[in-house]
Image (tube, coloured by chain):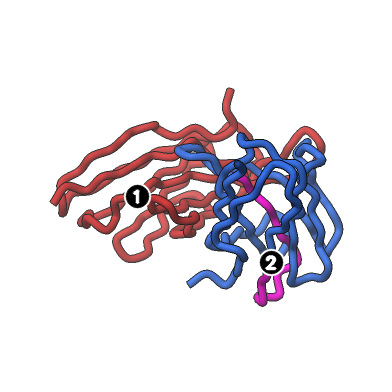
Chain colours: A red, B blue
Amino acid sequence: QKEVEQNSGPLSVPEGAIASLNCTYSDRVSQSFFWYRQYSGKSPELIMSIYSNGDKEDGRFTAQLNKASQYVSLLIRDSQPSDSATYLCAAILFTRSNDYKLSFGAGTTVTVRA
Amino acid sequence: DTEVTQTPKHLVMGMTNKKSLKCEQHMGHRAMYWYKQKAKKPPELMFVYSYEKLSINESVPSRFSPECPNSSLLNLHLHALQPEDSALYLCASSQAERNTIYFGEGSWLTVV
């Protein structure tokens, strides 16, 4: 089982619609979760971090965390063509060697159609 | 703009060359990272330095050699690379391990 799994996409939404991205993780003790946006040819850029159950809103972005169900999601409201990118879900997981590392999902490519 | 600066942005090297990638951050972060990213794949962790000491080595081949001269600098020394090592190399930092990680713009490496 992969440590962090994302709905693989690609996801195509019309401009102005809501884009919904989902991610599940395997480590019950994970405490920190992140969403990164990566434009083609660029490096990942942090857009949201979430640590507590519930919703966290930042502008048009809302992250949702449910630790009991081990999932984290990202909603992009009023999607714009500039939101077209790959979105990476990440979680800090405890490893077998008693270390913590940031593990990424495979990424979901979002295309917003004008 | 990212506060993690990587140089060079692009590097082409032959399989017998020795080169280095450099990374600098001035955020006072005490953890620094090297990641490797191939096309259409997520970043893969290579090394973690915490308080200037190597904390994690993800079984990376010895042709990649990390160095942390001080808390602001991180280098990745490259020697005898293979064409399959061509990738985007990402430096990142965080206040401490297990904290939010911020990436630099990356160094595109091509091995010919």
Q: Is residue A22 above or below residue B11?
A: above
Q: Position of residue A93 (x, y in %)?
A: 66, 41
**Residue at left offset 39%, top offset 53%:** A39
Query: What is the CA distance from the residue labelled 2 to the residue labelled 1?
Result: 27 Å
The mark found on residue B95 in the picture is: 2
Q: Is residue B26 magenta?
A: yes
Q: Position of residue A97 (x, y in %)?
A: 81, 36
Q: Position of residue B41 (x, y in %)?
A: 50, 37
**Tag 1, which secondary structure?**
strand
Q: Which residue is farthest top?
A: A1
Write down the chain letter for disc 1: A
Q: Position of residue A30 (x, y in %)?
A: 63, 43
| Amino acid of disc 2 | Gln
Q: Which residue is mark 1?
A: A85
Q: Between residues B21 and B102, which one lies in front from this camera angle?
A: B21
Instruction: Kindly tell me whether residue A5 is visible in this rendering.
Output: yes
Q: Nearer the viewer, mark 2 or mark 1?
A: 1
